[in-house]
Image (cartoon, rainbow, N blue to C red):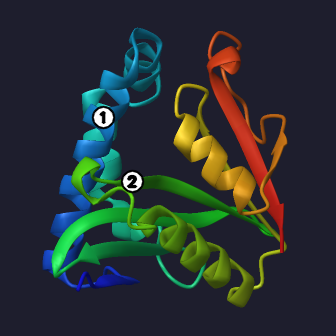
Amino acid sequence: MTITLIRPATAPEDLAAVRELCWDYRSHLSSVSPVDAELTETFYPVPKYTALIDTLETLHARPQGIILLAELDGQPVGCGMSHALFPDTSEIKRLYVTQQARGHGIARKLVTALVDQARIDGFSRVVLDTSVSLGPARALYASMGFDQRGPYQDIPAAALPHLLFFEATL
């Protein structure tokens, strides 16, 4: 029997696993298409991404954010995190499930847990963005009641045709 567990990443070993998953996520995004590789380098060049990953627990600290770790049969296979973008808005970031763990509903469980936590924390909406190239992610968000919307923060005009923005009202 396969056992999936979604839990807050708070221990040093949990955060180390999340950091490794975030680097895998960056590599995955860079491999999706040449456009996605360019977007990844534009938004997250290695020095900037390194600084971001090194400060995850500050950027997504409770009570206005959370870092979640997904395990499949005791092995880290996914992560997702949120933070307060605006006083009423939680933003989901770096939602990722490894290739070998896909098909177990882990991404859906991560999104559900992040949305539930945002609701508990008093936010009235959740936003996120994804690449146009990530069809399964787009389908997941739409199936979970997220509506497409325009950008919710400043995005370079050249990137806009390659990104989609979603929002869910809580």
Q: Amino acid at mark 1?
A: His
Residue closer to the observer: 110 or 68: 110
Residue depicted at x 35% and y 48%? 52
First of labels 2, 1 by sequence position: 1
Which percent across, then down, holds residue 4? 32, 81
Say above or below: 106 vs 52: below
Q: Which residue is mark 1?
A: 28
Q: Which mark is residue 57?
A: none
Say above or below: 92 vs 31: below
Q: Are marks 2 and 1 in contact (CB under 8 Å)?
A: yes
Say above or below: 55 vs 158: below
Q: Quadrant of the C terminus?
A: bottom right
Q: Residues within 10 Å of mark 2 (few under 14, many from 20)?
A: many
**Any part of residue 127 in sight:** no
Which percent across, then down, holds residue 81? 47, 65
Outermost residue, bottom direction?
A: 120
Label 1, secondary structure: give it. helix
Say above or below: 163 vs 109: above
Q: Which mark is residue 96?
A: 2
Residue depicted at x 66% and y 74%? 115
Q: How many marks?
A: 2
149 with respect to 60 (left or right): right
Give the distance between the C-alpha atoms of the residues marked 2 and 1, in whole angstroms.
9 Å
Q: Residue 118: which quarter of the image?
A: bottom right
Q: Residues within 10 Å of mark 1 (few under 14, many from 20)?
A: some
Which percent across, then down, holds residue 94? 44, 52
**Any part of residue 26 in sight:** yes
Label 2, secondary structure: give it. strand
